[in-house]
Image (cartoon, coloured by chain):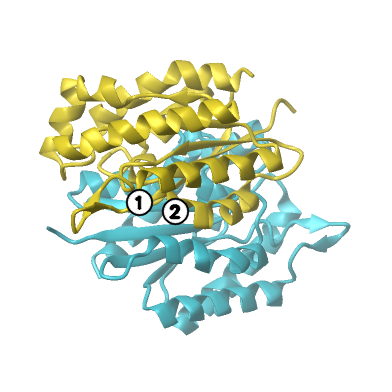
Chain colours: A cyan, B yellow
């Protein structure tokens, strides 16, 4: 028996891979990459559409407790934020400081259980004003993670500069890319993912 | 806006796709097939290793309620049973009639919420005695589903006769196949999946 690695990938529709005709998303691509590099793992995709940090805080723990069996190398990857920064009736669905507080609380709950965490920041969509809000949230999330000693992967700017990502988002539903966009995102995360798995 | 199809695939490690280096399992393969055939869907994989019908009954509803938003074409695919028929200290982890009662209760809960269900029967592993017990459970599950008007896909015998499935299971951990085995299983389910999606 080698290492028994079990990872819950918790977050929103980008984690779930909405828009990807291959049904992998970036989460599935990173899982397949680990297999290909000789590290078989059990990956549980717990991304849910439309969910904010508040929604995720409300359900992540029982879902992970079902899956992260004691005695295994149990870990968590987080990614959310775009739904928080979405405006409804002119205000963000979750205010910036509330998003930060939700993340900090969630990181505390993970630390109590001894689950190492990797966080991936929120990507851009086809809406400049929202992207500006998301970039602010991204910076705030990076601070929260730094305070908790959790690695944080920033992808927002690189994806805004990715012609593939932005073209697929526009061609899709305005928020989610297709398979090529998820390839780009998975490649951005891959080096951080490898380093984190090696810890 | 076309049809907004959201499907939770609820079950055990075979649903999760354990052993598949492509990180799709049969669930991911069927999702990709639907996309390829012009039916994009949101598929949530809720397979969890080692879980019996009792474990699944205990957690499936809150997990699906997070994901099956009202106003969508919300559906559920179920598959479990091999963990029920696993012997521990000489007895099945869940007795046959208890497994059947758990399934019937679960189908009732789905019907109350108006979620159409498709069930896939439990596959064989590399253990003849257990396969005999699983085949009995398979027949009992088929009855429960017939009583509830739920389509049930039997795969047990076809997989026992599949050289690819049985070879990969033996070469793996004794229970789970690799990518080729999941291809075989997905192909067995595909016609029933298509018909069910068309309802």
**Do the residues marked 2 and 1 share a common chain?**
yes
In the rendering, at what x and y percent does residue A161 appear?
Answer: 54, 48
In the rendering, at what x and y percent does residue B55 appear?
Answer: 44, 56
Query: Helix, strand, or loop for circle 2?
Result: helix
In percent of the image, x 32 and y 59: which residue is there?
A: A6
Q: Is residue A167 left or right of residue B161?
A: right
Q: Nearer the viewer, residue B42 or B123?
A: B123
> Which quadrant of the rendered structure holds the C terminus of chain A?
bottom left
In percent of the image, x 22 and y 35: which residue is there?
A: B131
User: In the image as oriented, which residue stretches furthest toward the right?
Assistant: A89
Residue B54 shows which numbered tag? 2
In percent of the image, x 76 and y 62: which residue is there?
A: A93
In the rendering, at what x and y percent does residue B193 appear?
Answer: 50, 22
Q: Which residue is mark 1?
A: B94
Residue B197 shows which numbered tag? none
Query: Helix, strand, or loop for circle 1?
Result: loop
The reply to whether callout 2 and callout 1 are in contact (CB within 8 Å) is: yes
């Amino acid at each position: 028996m080698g290492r028994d690695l079990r990872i819950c990938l918790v977050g929103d529709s980008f984690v779930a891979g909405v828009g990807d005709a291959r049904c992998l998303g970036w989460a599935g691509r990173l899982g397949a990459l680990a297999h290909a590099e000789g590290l078989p793992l059990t990956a549980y995709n717990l991304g849910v559409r439309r969910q904010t940090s508040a929604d995720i805080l409300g359900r992540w723990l029982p879902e992970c407790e079902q899956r992260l069996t004691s005695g295994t190398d149990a870990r968590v990857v987080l990614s959310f934020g775009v739904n928080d920064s979405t405006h409804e009736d002119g205000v963000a669905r979750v205010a910036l400081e509330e998003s930060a507080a939700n993340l900090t609380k969630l990181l505390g709950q993970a630390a109590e259980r001894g689950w190492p965490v990797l966080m991936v920041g929120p990507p851009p969509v086809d809406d400049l004003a929202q992207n500006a809000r998301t970039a602010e949230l991204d910076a705030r999330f990076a601070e929260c993670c730094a305070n908790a000693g959790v690695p944080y992967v920033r992808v927002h700017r690189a994806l805004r500069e990715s012609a593939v990502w932005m073209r697929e988002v526009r061609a899709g539903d305005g928020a989610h890319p297709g398979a090529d966009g998820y390839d780009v995102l998975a490649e951005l995360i891959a080096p951080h993912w490898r380093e984190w798995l090696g810890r």
